[in-house]
Structures are given as C-alpha cells and as structure tokens.
Image (tube, rainbow, N blue to C red):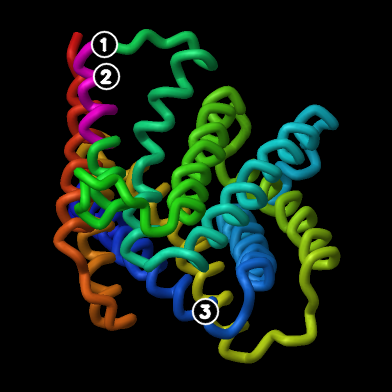
Amino acid sequence: MTNQSRAYMFAIAAILCWSTIASAFKITLRFVNFLQLLLLASVFSTVILFLILIIQKKIGLIKKTTRTDMLKSAMMGFLNPFMYYVILLKAYSLLKAQEAGTLNYIWPITLVLLSIPLLKQKISWLSILAVIISFTGIIIISTEGHLLHLEFKNPLGVALALGSSVFWALYWILNIKDHRDEALKLSMNFLFGTVYIFFLVLIFSDFNSISWKGVAGSLYIGFFEMGLTYFLWLKALQLSVNTARVSNLVYLSPFISLIIIQIALKEMILLSTIAGLVFIVGGILLQQVTKTKP
C-alpha cells in the first residue's frame, strides 16, 4: 500500500469520526448540561493527547517547555478548548443539530476575514465573492429558507454558532505563529483549557447530576472529536504527497453528518439546510481556488 493510499485511509477515518459529532453532541446533552459535557470531554481528550505524546516518544519535550511556552499554551487553551467549545456547545443546546453543525463550518471564511487585520493579508474580489456566497448560506440556514421575511428562528443560537468560529479562527491564526511541536502544544493547550473549564463548572454547574450515559457520550466526544481524530488527520497530512489531496476531503464531513443526524436523531433534514450548506462549502472552495492562483 502506498503512502498516499494510507493518507486517504487516515483522512477518511478522521472525516467519519467528525461526521458523528453533531449527533453525539445532541444525544449527550440529553443527559448532562453543556458545561459538564465539555469538562468530561476535555479531560478525556487531554489524557488521549498525552498518550499520543508518549506513543510518539515526544513526552521528553515537556522538559524543554519554557515560561513563554507555558504562557502561549495558557492563552491558546483559553481560545480552544475553553471559549470555542463553551460557545459551540451552548449553540448546540439551543439549535437543531443540522443547524449548529452546518453553521460551524463557516470558520474557514472567518479565518480569511480575521487574517486581513491580524496577518496583514490582502483580500481579492474573488475572496469577497466567496465570503458573500458563504454568508448567503448562513442566511438560508438561519431563516430556514424564508429569505424574504428574514425571520431568524433562534437568533441567539445562530449568533453563538457563528461566534464560535471566531475563536476557532483566532486559535489557528495564533497557532501559525507558534512553532512548537504540534502534538506537544495541542496537549499543553488542552491541559490549560481543561483547568479553565473545571473552574467554570465549579462556579456555574455541579458534579452531582452526571449520569453514566452522559459520561459515555462525553468519552466518545473526547476521543473522536478532540483526541484520536487529531492524530488520524495529522497522519493523513504527513503521508499525503500533497496536503490539498486530503484537506479538501474534509468538506464531505457536513454532508455525511446530515445523513447521520437524520438516522440517529430522527431530525427531518430541511432543504434549506442542504441549500445553505452548498452555499457555505461553495464559498469555501472558491476561497481555496483564490489561494492557488499565482
């Protein structure tokens, strides 16, 4: 088997894992509140990420961590998993899985917009068109297709789902400037983020009403959303001859996710959701085209 074939296998495995997460979020939120879910999932994922460090024989890198590195991880951990998932999971508690999961895929466009002031990048007219196309998809999903009336079914949930993309994009912009080993910095970031989440639960929630079903769902999310899937995706990128060959496959995830949502949650997938998703992904792919032009 060639390295490229192995890359596709790892990429597809990661995409299938991510495609189940919207359903896993909604199911688990039936048994725990969003803060409890996040704490449990973050603890599990942090353990998994440190195990990956051990498996890759990189645990010794922790000894080389400087005070500046610790401050970076403290800031990065605040953005993700702390702020990103607190906002995203609250959005999931307010919206249908198909809405929250689909709107979450707007982050590549948010990344482009934030790169203008933060990375001093110029934006082309084609990129502006891509943003408009994706934004149209957001309006379609948020209004459930009632574009003329512009009646948002759950404006707070929509705002939170879109707001989470800002923290995710900020996280990856800062990640570009952090040249530490990927596995090390992700593990340290999640360690700090988990500490923040612990104190948030201590203040605004409790540890008494957590059922075993909530623990099981959180374990699944921590394993497949935050932990193992990172390793699978990283391996796919490392083995691929060209990262574009596997990175574009990620846009299959929201479409597969809608199928799983319909089966697992019995949600009727609205035509407006599918149409909006096509606009969002179309805008993102158009943005990718602008990057490849000389």
Residue 183 left/right relative to 256 = right
Q: Circle 1 sits in a helix, a strand or a loop, which is it? A: loop
Q: Is 37 drawn above or below residue 87 in the view shown?
A: below
Quick one: quadrant of the N terminus?
bottom left
Q: CA distance from mark 2 to mark 1?
A: 6 Å
Q: Residues within 10 Å of mark 3 (few under 14, many from 20)?
A: many
Amino acid type at mark 1: Ser
Q: Is 182 drawn above or below residue 38 in the view shown?
A: above
Q: Is 116 drawn above or below residue 81 in the view shown?
A: above
Q: Which residue is mark 2?
A: 128
Q: Circle 3 sits in a helix, a strand or a loop, which is it? A: helix
Residue 153 visible, this angle: yes
Q: Which residue is mark 1?
A: 124
Q: Which residue is mark 3?
A: 28
Considering every residue shown, the one lying at the far bottom of the view is 212
Label the magenta part by its dominant secondary structure. Answer: helix
Point 26% across, 74% down: residue: 260
* Magenta segment boundaries in residue numbering: 124-134
